[in-house]
């Protein structure tokens, strides 16, 4: 399995979404959303090839990107 690493801004964004989901729903909904999101992310951390990112800076570094619907 490949290593999954979140940037500081990604961590901050995920926490913000978690808080938002928590405010809109019942207690614990934000954490459940975060756990489902993390499972989806790790599902793609298998050692197989994905398309290069469309973002030029990432593509030049040979990063692969996936789009996750929620």
Image: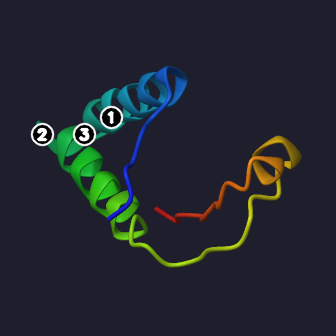
Dot 1 surroundings within 10 Å: few (below 14), some, or many (20 or more)? Answer: some
Nearer the observer, 37 or 22: 37
In this picture, residue 42 sits left or right of residue 51: left
Give the mark, 1 or 2, whose residue is nearer the N terminus: 1
Residue 37 % position (x, y)? 34, 54
| x then y, percent, for residue 46 | 39, 72
Residue 54 relative to residue 2: left or right: right
| Mark 2 lies on residue | 28
Q: Residue at x 64, y 60 (%)?
A: 65
Instruction: Give the left or right position of residue 34, taking residue 47 as reference.
Output: left
Work out whether residue 45 or residue 31 is closer to the camera in this orientation and state it: 45
Quarter where residue 2 is shown: bottom left
Mark 3, Cα crowd under 10 Å, few <14 / some 14-19 / many 20+, is many
Q: How many callouts does the rendering have?
A: 3
Label 1 with label 3: CB-CB less than 8 Å: yes
Task: In the rendered view, tell whether residue 48 sits above or below residue 8.
Answer: below
Name the N-terminal-most of marks 1 and 3: 1
Q: Quadrant of the N terminus?
A: bottom left
| Farthest-out residue, bottom | 48
Residue at position x 33%, y 61% in the image: 42
Q: Secondary structure at mark 1?
A: helix
What secondary structure is marked by label 3? helix
Disc 1 to disc 3, how far (Cα)? 4 Å
Label 2 crowd bin: few (<14), some (14–19), many (20+), radius 10 Å:
few
Q: Quadrant of residue 52?
A: bottom right
Location of mark 1 (residue)? 18
At which x and y percent is residue 18? 33, 34
In the rendered image, which residue does mark 3 sit on? 30
């Amino acid at each position: 399995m490949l290593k999954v690493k979140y940037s500081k801004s990604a961590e901050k964004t995920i926490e913000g979404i978690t808080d938002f989901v928590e405010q809109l729903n019942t207690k614990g909904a934000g954490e459940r959303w975060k756990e489902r999101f993390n499972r989806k992310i790790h599902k793609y951390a298998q050692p197989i090839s994905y398309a290069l990112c469309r973002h030029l800076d990432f593509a030049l570094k040979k990063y692969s990107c996936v789009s996750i619907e929620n």
